[in-house]
Amino acid sequence: MKNVSRATWIILVLLFIYLPIMLLAVYSFTTSPQLGTIREFSLKNYVTLFETAELKDMIIGTFTLAVGSAMIATLFGTTGAIGAFYSKKLPKLAINSMNQVPVVNADVVTGFSICIFLIVVLNMNKDSYIPLVIGHVLLSSPFVYLSVIPKLKQMDESTYEAALDMGATPFKALVKIVIPQIVPGILSGFVMAVTLSLDDYFIATYTKPAAFDTISTYVVNATRGARTDIKTALWGLSTVIFVFVVILVVAMNVPGGKKDREGDR
């Protein structure tokens, strides 16, 4: 009975999480102008999605921002994690504590404060992409840090010390010994940074140029009087993003699962 109740609870939770996404995916393959009625199945929404210049520019711009800011955030988060890991107890505690503040802090506070500091205090051009990029880097870097730290703790520190004893410089030992052992954490942090950037609304709203829209800001604005075909095309966009994330997660976890099974043998 315990196993049945546990399985039932897991199934209910999974249905609660994924059923709305699945329903949206089904409707994205129909000609229905609104949720609730299915008229006929069609690829019209996907044709609109990939043939409308406005939507294509928005998608390309969003993914360019996400990948670019994630690369910078991965660099900052990884170097910060390595620096904190090899620091003394007090600096390490201070860095860990400061890293938790952006994670817990509300995005709207981060976005508004960046807007005030860069645009009002530093008088930065409102049409510049720099505040937007800085905002997404600040949003993502702490999560990269949190992804890398556990891999550093799992690392065999004796190999790094052995490399130093054999004459390697600290930088060479870092590149040859430490980095290869924490690559899974770095990749996990990079993927998380990409998804955080794709998902962000508040920071982008306060820091983006007026002529630029991310997927999040575009979707919110599209609910206020946009054409019906644009609204339904966004159902297809949601489905494409979900499938992309699923493929990415599977690709990241399959190699790790194979290594674990080989280790058990």
Image (cartoon, rainbow, N blue to C red):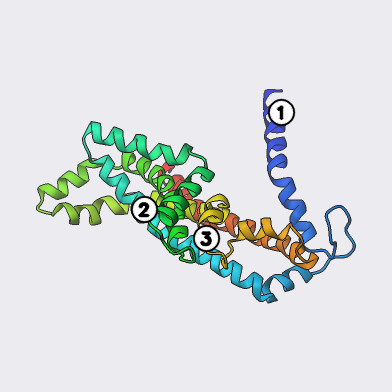
In front here: 31 or 140? Answer: 140
Of residue 5 and residue 122, the one placed in the foreground of this image is 122
Above or below — where is 235 with respect to 147?
A: below
**Element type where label 2 sits in the image:** helix
Asked whether, in this view, residue 244 is left or right of residue 135, the answer is: right
120 left or right, relative to 203: left
Q: Which residue is mark 3?
A: 208
* Residue at 20 percent of width and 46 percent of height: 160
Image quarter of the N terminus: top right
Name the residue that disc number 1 marks: 4
- In the rendered image, is residue 143 in sight? yes
Q: Amino acid at mark 3?
A: Lys
Residue at 50% x, 60% y: name it. 66
Instruction: Give how far apart the Cα atoms at labels 3 and 2 are.
Output: 32 Å
For marks 3 and 2, give the one nearer the viewer.
Answer: 3
Of callouts 2 and 1, the N-terminal one = 1
At horizontal 71% and vertical 51% (from top left) the residue drawn is 21
In this rendering, the label closer to the viewer, 2 or 1 = 2
